[in-house]
Every structure is written in structure tokens, then in C-alpha cells.
Image (cartoon, rainbow, N blue to C red):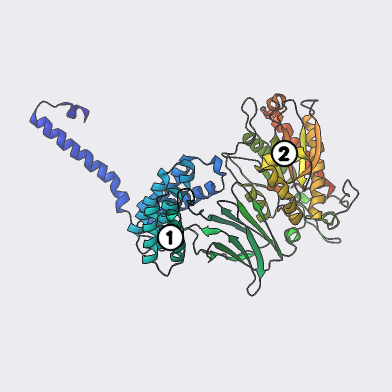
Amino acid sequence: MTAFFGQNQTGKHRAGRVLGALVVALLLFGLAAPVHSASRRTRLRLGKQQLAKAKSLHANLNGTPKKNRREKDYLNATRRYRRVYDLAPFSGIAADALAARAELYHDMGAQFGRKYWVKAIEEYRFLRREYPYSRYRASALFNIAQVQHVHLKDWKAALASYRAVRKAYPRSRYAAKARTAIQQISKARSATRKSKRAPPTHRVQVRNIRYWNTKDYTRVVVDLDEKVRFQDARLSNPDRIFFDLFNSELSPVLSGKTFIMEEGLLKRLRVAENRSGVTRVVLEVKNAQDYSVFTLPNPFRLVVDIRAPNASTTAKKSRKPSSAPAGGKTEVAGGVPPQSVSPPKPTQDGKLTNIRALGLKLRRIAIDPGHGGYDTGTVGATGLMEKDLVLDVAQRLGRMLQKQLGAEIVYTREDDTYVPLENRIALANEKQVDLFISIHANSSRNRGVRGVETFYLNFTSDPAVLELAARENALSQKSIHELQDLVRQITRNEKISESRELAREIQRHLHGQLRKTSRRIINRGVKRAPFVVLIGGTMPSVLTEIAFLSNRTDEKILKSAAGRQKVAEGLYAGLSQYMENLNSIAMLPNGQKSAANPK
């Protein structure tokens, strides 16, 4: 073909070039034809796939602190939403995708400039033009007016848009809002420059609602733009818990949404604007004993935990016992009889907790590698990132627990993915794990500081511990002190006692292992702290800081596979010793109990 196009001296050759171009065009058309000729069913299926991916990207953005959100991540999500429309413009999901795309542009304006507010208006107008009878027709027009009014300060255009809302949708809830906005703009325009009022503040928007739902435990997370005041209550017939969020409004994507669940404590979730400026979230539940609620900032979230009666022990009792009752007969693989058992040991404080008195067994363990994705955690002097280090240690620990103790491992993340803090303990509760360990690496402004320390959930007044908790939680000092009331509400004495005991064993064995690599490793002890990642757990749970990456010597040790293996072995030894104290060491297939320290 190259030789053919290279001959350009005669009319015949020019005609050949035209013919060649036509051939290329036909080939290109032929390649594109299957996409355009695909059945409506196929295109709808592909459109739904793109919508699911776009929603996932959107949710990740909502779960990311605003200061860490990147423009390219927003644009990637907007392209996915647009692809839904391109694939299935004939379906209802196309309107949903365009509304979400406009919402993303709306958000981007505050971070990346007014051009995205202009794009948001264009997208809302496109949505109204393409789908004039969709459920977004009124909200889209009102959102255009809001952007013009609040963000672009184009009061003339905003007045025209607000008036159009009142004229076109006089019976909608947006008509009253438009009337109020028109009055506000009129007052501001008529005042003198010195007394001129700023446009009214935009209400806090409810962006997203996430939930984890099981028969014993449910966690619901409501994502908002900013902090809001709220009130909650519980009503009967039907049993429901509701939350009123003041000075708020729903994202158009959530407006009037109802989620129905087939299984679990939570049966139905409804969200709507109860009255002007008040958003109500209603959780219809079945067989729920109690609930607790707390808030987290950056971004602001409302977190609700719902529990069934005796949720913390139901899962344990339903598990198959590891040994037969007295007088019974037990079949063991390989014909080896089970070893004799001894009663659990008291805690180091000389107490016998209910977990020990009841002889409850521990088999399923959650391992939480801290940070991940955009959240790198601490970065050492030579570039070792905490998120990579703790993931490697977590996987080493998990393999040992599976191989040596036959434990079932649940990871909160298995790759370089960002997982919001409140999601991690919710996953552990959902999977009904027996123990939870979160692995982190420390840092200090003093580069000479070294050592290991382990924490359990409780309040504290230690400024150094609060500083560390603030760093791990990405919260301000004020928010850390606010967490003390939260911890007091949702922490149970039984879990505190066992968590402290678990922390002691992990700290002792971890320090012992690391001293084999460096005699100067300091044992910084067991401490209590309000770590968000531990809040709401129904099992003994700890957070361990395995070293100081800010110290060059510690970083050098942990950059080697041998050093990471020592850390994993120390954690393993602590966990297995704790389980042995409870008489909960898992039995291997041959009936032999594993050693406390693998070789």
C-alpha cells in the first residue's frame, strides 16, 4: 500500500490514491460496525458495567480527603459516566450517569476552578435536553441556578433559572427553594455596596451512603461535604432508627432513594428531605438490640453500628467445636487421638474473663495492613513506604498463621488499595472474625527514636499517644479529644481486657524477635489510644507499630526480607501465645499442636 500511495505522477495514480483512501475508510467502518450494530441487550449490559465502574471510582473519591483528591481521578470517573450514555442512551441508566457526571463537575469547581462549574451547567443542560421527562428534570434546572448563584455569582442568570424552576415545576419541592433564593438575591441586589450581603451559603450535601449488612452486625456510613448537626431516635411498628441531618440536602443521585436488603439486620434504608434543609435517613431493622453512632472528619462521615442480641458471642457459639463434649467420641484425621486439654489461663492481671470462662475458641483472624493506595503512610529517609512494608509483613504473618495454626485469615486489603478506616473494622465484624490486628510503622520528628509499641482501644491523656493517633487517624487534636466520648460509648469492658492481654503478648514477642537483629531496639510498651480503625470492633483488637521508619537503622532492617520476616515471626509468636493461653491453639490435620515459633 505504501508503494501504491507513493506514485503520484499521473491521474491514474491519483485515482488509485482516492480508491485506497476509500478502502481504508471501509476497513475502519468495518472495525467500528460491531459496536454500533450490537444488540440493545448487549449495549445495556456494557453500559451497566461502565456504570458500576464509574460508581466505584466515585465512591473512592468520596472516601478520600479533599486535599488528596486528584483532578485526573475525577476526570476518569466523568469519562466512565459519559461512556454509559454513549453505550445505552435508550436506557434509564444513561440519565443516572449524566446526573452523576454533572455532580462530579460541580464538586470539581471548588478544587480546580470555575471552568468545572461551567461544565456542570453544560452537563445539567445536556441531561435536560436529552431526557426531558427524567426524574432529574427539576433538580437539574435547580442545580443550574445554584451554580450560577452560589459559585459563579451570576445573579442575573441565577434569577432567570430560579424563575424557570418556579414556572415549570410549581408543585415540586424545588419551587419553594427557588422562591427563597429569589428573595435573597433581590435583597442583596437592592442593598448598597457597603451593606451588600453575600449570597446565601449552600447547604451541606449528602453525597453517598454505604452499608455492610449481616445477621449479627450492620454498619452504615453517610458521606457529607461538611460537618452537620444531627439528631437520632428509634421508633417501633416497624422497628426503625432515623437520623435527621440539619442544614443539608441530598445529592440528586440519592434523591428519594430506597435500598431493600434480602438478608441481615438492616431490611430497608430510605433517604429523603424530610423538610426544607433537613435530610432524614431511615434504617428499618429486624431483631436489632442496640445501635451506636459517631462521626469522623476529613471528609465528614456519620457512622452507625447496629448489633443483634449477643452479637459478639453468637458467631462463636455457632462455630463447630474443636473437641467433643465430655464422654463423647472424636474422629481425628489419621487416627491420632486429640491431645488432653487444660483450662485457659487467667490474664496477667489474674482475672478470668467471660471469653476464658466460656472456653470460646479463636480461629478466624483479621489482619489489617495500614494505609494503601494514595495514602502512603510514613515514608523513610531512603523512600521505604509504610503501606508497602506493612502489606508485606501482613502477608507473611497470614501465611504462618494458616500453615502453623490452621487459622482462617481475613485481610482488609491484599494489594495497594486505599480502604477507608471505618470500612476495615466493619469488614472484620461482617466476617465474624475472632481477633483483629492492624499493622503500622511509626515516625518521629526526632530521627534517633527507635522501638516498637502496641495499642488497644481506650481513651488516654498522653500527649505523645494522642499525637500518634492524630497522625494515623488524620484528625486534628480537637477531633482526637472528641473521640474520647465516642470510645466510651462503644467500647465494652470485656473487649478492653482481652485486647490489652493480646497487646501484651504481641509486644513482648515482637520486641524479643527484633532484638535478634538489633540490641538497641527499645520496648516502648503497651498503650491505649483512640484509633479509628479499632472503633466498633466486636472482637479483641490491637494496633501495633512495628518500628520507626523515620530512623535510618530501623528502615534499613525493614528493607530486607530477613528483617520483615523477623517482624512477622514476632507477631505470630505473640498471637499464638495469646491463643495458647486461651486454650485456643488450632489443631493441625495430624492432630499435633504447632510450635509457638516456626523455624
Query: In x, y percent, where is residue 450?
Result: 76, 29
Residue occupying image coordinates x 45% and y 48%: 193
Report the residue marked by disc 1. 182
- Dot 2: element: helix
Q: Quadrant of residue 146?
A: bottom left
Distance of label 1 from label 2 (alpha carbons): 48 Å
Q: Residues within 10 Å of mark 2 (few under 14, many from 20)?
A: some
Where is the C terminus found, in terms of image quarters?
top right
Residue occupying image coordinates x 36% and y 64%: 133
Q: Quadrant of residue 279?
A: bottom right
Q: Residues within 10 Å of mark 1 (few under 14, many from 20)?
A: many
In this rendering, would 280 be left or right of 485?
Answer: left
Residue 408 seen: no
In this rendering, would 296 be left or right of 540?
Answer: left
Query: In front here: 104 or 413?
Result: 104
Q: Are marks 1 and 2 in contact (CB under 8 Å)?
A: no
* Residue type indicated by callout 2: Glu
Mark 1 or mark 2: which comes first in sequence?
Answer: 1
Query: In x, y percent, where is residue 47?
Result: 40, 54
Residue occupying image coordinates x 71% and y 64%: 290
Report the residue marked by disc 2. 467
In this rendering, would 192 be left or right of 536?
Answer: left
- Dot 1: element: helix
Residue occupying image coordinates x 69% and y 45%: 478
